[in-house]
Amino acid sequence: MLKIFSQVKTRLKPISLSRFNFIIAAWLALALNFTFYQQSLHYADLTGAHSAIFAIGLGLVLTLYYFIFMQILSWQWNKKWIACLLLFIGGCSAYFVNSMGIMITPEQIQNMMQTDHTEALNLLSWQYLVWFVLMVVLPIGVVIILPVKKDTLLPLLGKKFGSIIVAVALAGGAVYLNYINFSSLFRGHREVKNLISPNNVFSSGLSYYKKLSYKPLPLLQYGLDARHNTAATVNQKPKLMVLVVGETARAESFSLNGYSKNTNPELAKVTGLINFTQASSCGTATAVSVPCMFSGMPRTEYDERLASHREGLLDIAKRAGYQITWIENDSGCKGVCNRVNNFVIPDDIKKKYCENRDYCLDGVLLESLQRYLEQIPATDHRPQLVVLHQIGSHGPAYYQRTTPEFAPFQPICDTTAIQSCERSKLINSYDNSIVYTDHILSKIIGVLAQNDKYQTGFWYLSDHGESTGENGLYLHGAPYALAPSQQTHIPMMMWFSPEWQRSRPQQVACLMQQRQAKRGQDNLFPTLLGLLDVESQTIQPKLNMLAQCANP
């Protein structure tokens, strides 16, 4: 192979460095970014010749942009590895942009950095391998064998300077001739820049790095005034609240919310279930939504940096006297469970639900909860808050999030290359994962209903939703302002044992009244503390669902 490369290289006529850089720039601009052009033309809403002129202008400007970049950074000594690096990064990012409609944002970079190897491997497929060979390996191979003339420094500087002046002039002229369309696009739809590979990786990566470059800050205590109002529960059993944080479940796929397919056969039979039909998330990715919902900050005021070094909901409940336990079956708690008890799932339970799978089935949470409750000493009368973090409907391997017993919708998409599946099969796979979640949640409620040591309560809400091909989008993580409802409209429901309802009938009635109201993760912090009879100045009445009625 090396001999063939060498023979081909000797037959090729050497080209100038400027021409070499222009070839790389043209490939980056024109071969990798067809989704960018598609979306840009959609937003421009032009037809006929006007559309063609605008498309040509976009391609020219982007090519010249990369050419100027290459002329500044690419020299005789580093030209090949600069080109290979850009081709590698651009080719890899372009696959996800073009095949799944994913925008490369700082949040997506954060998701990538916080993911584990199993989650990353789920994104790989034979389609990705084909793309990688054709759009990454082959271009890099061409770059390696392409001979480039060697110029002395002064002539090279002259050529670079002259070509940059010409490129700037041409780009400026193209923008001037299409100024209204360019201005409208990049002012009204700035997000399209996140579709331009590999520029999106570098710009978003830089934004993410700036966050990391901040010096670690000391932990800020929050809610120091928190106290458990024991007078409210005198002569009553202690409370046990189980909070289930779902993963990638969207409200529109729950039959409880009107979906045509019966994805909630078991929850539909649960007496006393309070289903909130208009709940929304704080973010479109776990790395944002989970810290946000536990922070005490509403979405519009959420400060990620502050949340990362300030106590949150679990710390406050713990300070008030609750035993806090986190049971994990996803990719981590994103820092919110760092200062509370983390239940170690026993090996025998893992063996049952985790073997031969990329992640454990959520049945591992159900049995871990049962095991944890069994281990609480009879003399331990502390109130309990248990958080279960699901794998839920985590994509793209939806077909692995359920079992044959809970996969009524067939045929399915049994690959991680979900963009290549028939839409009906993909939806079946996703819906089956919701059916399994329905089963697990109903069984958790069943465990709580049979517990006679505590007043028991249950709250479920997903961290965010999911796109399954609507408008060419897949997975999640879109910028919130642009995210479709599939990524932000989440399922949320509560249940309370008869004993809890008898002790707090006004609270339950108040919550029932809000089933069709706009609620969501912003309400978790104040409402959960209120349900737990925790008093603190950190509770915002306007977000506390228990404060929305005359006699909560």
Image: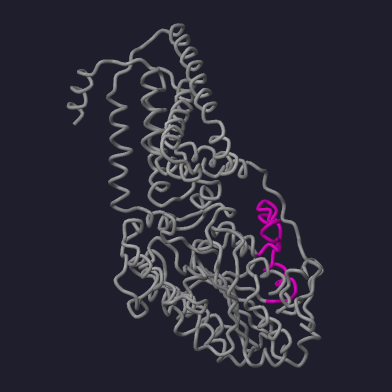
Quarter of the image where the C terminus is located: bottom right
Tell whether position 298 is magenta: yes
Where is residue 312 drawn, in percent x and y?
69, 64
Q: Residue furthest front?
A: 48
Where is residue 390 drawn, in percent x and y?
50, 70
**Based on the displayed image, in which of its 4 quarters is residue 261 positioned?**
bottom left
Residue 90 visible in the shown view: yes
Residue 99 vs 199, above or below: the answer is below
Say left or right for 273 vs 359.
right
Residue at (60% x, 84% y) in the render: 495
Say left or right for 249 vs 403.
right
Where is residue 540 drawn, in percent x and y?
77, 68
In the rendered structure, which segment of residues is drawn in magenta? 294-322
Say left or right for 516 vs 441.
right
Q: Nearer the viewer, residue 135 or 37?
A: 37
Where is residue 338 drawn, in percent x and y?
62, 62
Residue 286 vs 267, above or below: the answer is above
How many dots with numbers? 0
Residue at (37% x, 79% y) in the render: 406
Q: Nearer the viewer, residue 368 or 148?
A: 148
**Based on the displayed image, in which of its 4 quarters is residue 206 positioned?**
top right
Quarter of the image where the N terminus is located: top left
Q: Nearer the viewer, residue 85 or 280?
A: 280
Residue 539 visible in the shown view: no
Residue at (67% x, 44% y) in the render: 215
